[in-house]
Image (cartoon, rainbow, N blue to C red):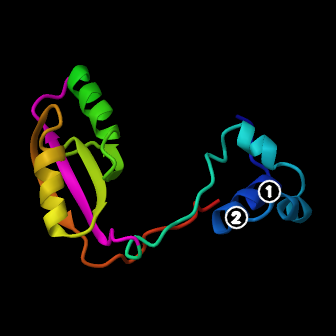
Amino acid sequence: MGQLDKTDRRILTILQMDGRIAAVELADRIGERLKRLQREGYVAGFGARLDPHMVGLGFLVFVEVLLDKTTPDVFERFAKSIQRAPEVLECYMVAGGFDYLVKTRLSDMTAYRRFLGDVLLALPGVKETRTYAVMEEVKSYAPLPL
């Protein structure tokens, strides 16, 4: 990957604020660099940000996951399995007192309890979980500070 100059940063900032901007309008505003930024991997994709409450997924939960062993094969099996769980929005391997941090959205606590028992605790290597239900979303999306 190459270096980002001032114009590249401007393009990426505009795209983070309005991903629906027409390529022609974007080209008029900042030049013909969008295709290069996509090709080089700076732009990972485009999509709409949905209001989770409007689609019945207003219950946001973070879950700490502790595995029974910390070996490469256990990590690999867990990672492959969790990628197949559509309820999981994000999953990060972390350093510290647990192994993974999982972010999920569901309709309510009943749906979360079902997800916890049927999906999360059934994943390979899961020894223990700690659940953190979000009471208020203070800041849930921000563009990268370029």
- Residue 97 visible to the viewer: no
Instruction: Indicate the amino acid at tag 2.
Output: Arg
As drawn, the residue found furthest toward the top would be 73
Q: Is residue 115 above or below residue 96?
A: below
Task: Identify the magenta region.
Answer: 55-71
Task: Please give the label number shown on residue 6.
Answer: 1
Q: Secondary structure at mark 1?
A: helix
Q: In the rendered view, would you say 18 is above or below 93?
A: below
Q: Outermost residue toward the front? A: 55
Residue 120, given in percent of the width and then of the height, sits at: 18, 45
Of labels 2 and 1, earlier in sequence is: 1
| Residue 5: % across, % down | 79, 50
- The quadrant of the picture occupied by the C terminus is bottom right
Q: Are marks 2 and 1 in contact (CB under 8 Å)?
A: no
**Residue at left offset 32%, top offset 31%:** 80
- The disc at residue 20 is 2
Residue drawn at x 59%, y 57% is 47
Task: Point out the frontmost of discs 2 and 1.
Answer: 2
Q: The residue tagged with tag 2: helix, strand or loop?
A: loop
